[in-house]
Image: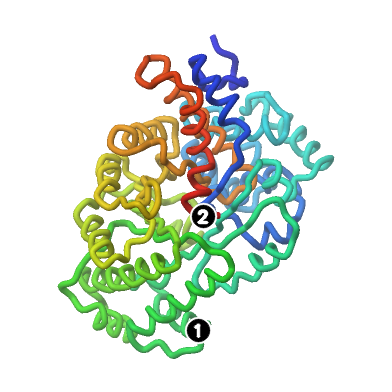
Amino acid sequence: MNKFMDKDFLLDTESAKKLFHEYAENMPICDYHCHLSPQEIYENEQPSDISQLWLSGDHYKWRAMRSCGVDEKYCTGDATPKEKFLKFGETLGWCIGNPLYHWAHIELQRYFGIDTPLSAKTAEDIYERANKVISEGDFRPQTLIEKSNVKFVCTTDDPIDDLKYHKLLAQQDLPFRVLPSFRPDKALNIENDGFVEYIEKLGEVTNRKIKDITGVINALCERADYFNEVGCKVSDQAFNYVPYNFEDSAGKAFEKALKGKELTQGEIDAYKTCIMLYLGAKYKRLGWAMEIHIGAMRNNNTAMFNKLGADVGFDSVGDCEIAQPLSRYLDKLCDGDCLPKTILFNLNDKDNTVLATMLGNFQSSEAAGKIQFGPAWWFLDTMDGMTAQMKSLANLGVLGKFIGMETDSRSFTSYGRHEYFRRIMCRLIGRWVEDGWYADDDEMLKQIIQGICYNNAIEYFKF
């Protein structure tokens, strides 16, 4: 029997152990997509306890707790920090096979020096031990980022953000950089409540009265230029499905929305298609990478959405068809020489083959792996999900040019997820070497492993 999550956790061959310990383990991290707060990074405050560090905004943990019948007051409610942690500890003991179990124990080991498995019977002891480590140590955000060997952090930011904290952080002598990412979802989601009010705010930020779709495009492009000046290299768009429609008028759709009139699905898609084509071309001119996250079905529980709002653990996987509209969108940009570097993320693993084969349609000499199959994301961020994504990319594309993992997280200790990914990657590739499927070529394997860990992303984003 293997020891519980020891130094060779998941590394089940000698090749895997060598690949991880010699080539992957100590590589820096480029976290090119996350939801960390630049304000919290700048203010750099010491957390009060492990509950604040772990449970204050982590919907992964909340979902697991709810699945164990834990009352909402221990997730997002007014229970004490200790009560919340004890309920989480009780929950974790039941999470056999869930990556949350592995993530939590990697974090306990790396940041707190605690090897004891967390469960109901150990939760109180671990709570006290972890808090003692926090009280005697430095758990401020900047310290945790540095300790995790992170060199680049790309946050997720709205076009109307003034990027105040990114500018302030850029003035500090830090061993890492915190860069903004351009996330125009609120300007794209014409069907959502609050869209008209958002367009008014966008107009205020750009000193214009936005009366038509041209005004929206010009305002977003102006904000993209501003983000570029502050160091932005990445945009990010999230879609439940991929919109593509030229049959309806995008301009008329926008005019109807301003008047509060109900839009047809065709009009919604026409508006989004128009904006996304102009934005894609803008990203190309700026030299940015365009991330497209596809397939989340959000805010399924109406009662809890009305009570708590979005992004608190009531989203799931959609099952829309994406191949045709995605191909048409990318082709339209490519045909006009306007296709930027693009990273495609799917949330439904039925689409692995779709995305892995889509890449090859639009590659070019502009960049190695110009069109990327993004790492297994959110509900696919599991041992099986990550393995399946890398197998699909290896089978149908070029795994050696993959830009690797990002955390997609709001937690400053979530960088253990990079270690988890690297162990799974080395397990997979190590098996291929052991089975004689790939040459036991140390020099080439080192380049592949370290490229996927860090080097490919640095070259891709031109950091």
| Amino acid, disc 1 | Thr
Find the residue positioned furthest to the top.
1
Find disc 2 in the rendering and name its residue.
Answer: 462
Vertical side of 205 occupied by 159: above or below: above
At 61% from the left edge and 41% from the top edge, which residue is drawn?
28
Find disc 1 in the rendering and name its residue.
Answer: 206
- Find residue 200 and report its horizontal and vertical position in percent: 45, 84
Residue density around tag 1, few if under 14, some if 14–19, many if 20 or more, within 10 Å: some
Q: Are marks 1 and 2 in contact (CB under 8 Å)?
A: no
At 35% from the left edge and 19% from the top edge, which residue is drawn?
437
- Find residue 219 and report its horizontal and vertical position in percent: 44, 80
Number of marks in picture: 2
- Find residue 257 and report its horizontal and vertical position in percent: 31, 81
Separation of marks 1 and 2 at Cα, in angstroms: 28 Å
The chosen color scheme is rainbow
Q: Taking 184 as reference, is 152 left or right?
A: right
At 48% from the left edge and 56% from the top edge, which residue is drawn?
311
Vertical side of 250 occupied by 389: above or below: above
Find the residue positioned furthest to the right.
136
Q: Which part of the image, by quadrant, shows the N terminus? A: top right
| Amino acid, disc 2 | Lys
Vertical side of 138 occupied by 300: above or below: below
Q: Where, by quadrant of the figure, is residue 281 drawn? A: bottom left
Q: Where, by quadrant of the figure, is residue 438 drawn? A: top left
Q: Taking 158 as reference, is 282 left or right?
A: left
At 44% from the left edge and 30% from the top edge, which residue is drawn?
383
Q: Tell me, yes or no, if residue 300 can be seen here.
A: no
